[in-house]
Image: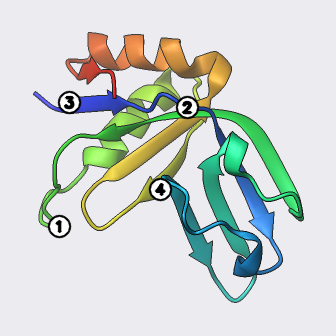
């Protein structure tokens, strides 16, 4: 049985002009940089003041444990279940695992839907 761990904080997804605006000492953040943008996911309270664009109101959970790269379809199965219930997601992956963010108003429904599909959810 796959376990999902709820994150106990509100999250913000935003774009920043450069990484100097990001406090790299905070507990939780993701930075994505491409030739077109620098994206940041962080606790809402840690969002830099100078963002280009931002969207607040996200909550999230992570797939517990270290996922081997040979495992196939874990993220697509979860996002597929949520899509079947008209719940949009913002997914971020690390070396170890995947994080799924949903809008705050869909968070409890997301967990309920995933639990009914056989996923175990627990608090952080």
Say if mark 4 contacts mark 1, CB within 8 Å.
Answer: no
Q: Secondary structure at mark 4?
A: strand
Hey, which quadrant is residue 59 in on the image?
top right
Q: Which residue is mark 1?
A: 69
Q: Secondary structure at mark 1?
A: loop
CA–CA distance between discs 3 and 2?
19 Å
View extreme (front): residue:
25
Q: Nearer the viewer, residue 40 or 100?
A: 40
Please state the horizontal and vertical placement of residue 117, each as a whole percent of the image.
26, 17
Dot 3 or dot 2: first in sequence order is 3
Residue occupying image coordinates x 46% and y 28%: 82
Q: Which residue is mark 2?
A: 9
Q: Quadrant of residue 122?
A: top left
As measured in the structure, the alpha-carbon distance from the residue carrying label 3 to the one carrying label 1 is: 18 Å
Question: Of the residues under marks 3 and 4, which one precedes in the sequence?
Answer: 3
User: Mark 3 = which residue?
Assistant: 3
Query: Which dot, 3 or 1, sits closer to the camera?
Result: 3
- Residue sitting at x 35%, y 40%: 62
Q: CA distance from mark 2 to mark 1?
A: 28 Å
Badge 4 is on which residue? 92
Locate residue 120, reporting x and y percent. Answer: 21, 20
**Left or right, 106 with reference to 72:** right
């Amino acid at each position: 049985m796959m376990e999902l761990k709820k994150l106990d904080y509100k999250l913000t997804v935003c774009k920043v002009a450069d990484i100097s605006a990001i406090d790299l000492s905070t507990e939780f953040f993701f930075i994505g940089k491409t030739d077109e943008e620098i994206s940041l996911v962080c606790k809402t309270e840690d969002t830099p003041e100078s963002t280009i664009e931002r969207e607040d109101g996200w909550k999230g959970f992570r797939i517990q444990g270290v996922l081997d790269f040979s495992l196939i379809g874990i993220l697509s199965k979860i996002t597929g279940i949520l899509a079947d219930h008209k719940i949009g997601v913002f997914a971020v992956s690390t070396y170890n695992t995947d994080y799924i963010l949903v809008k705050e108003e869909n968070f409890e429904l997301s967990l309920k839907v995933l639990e009914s599909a056989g996923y175990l959810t627990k608090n952080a």
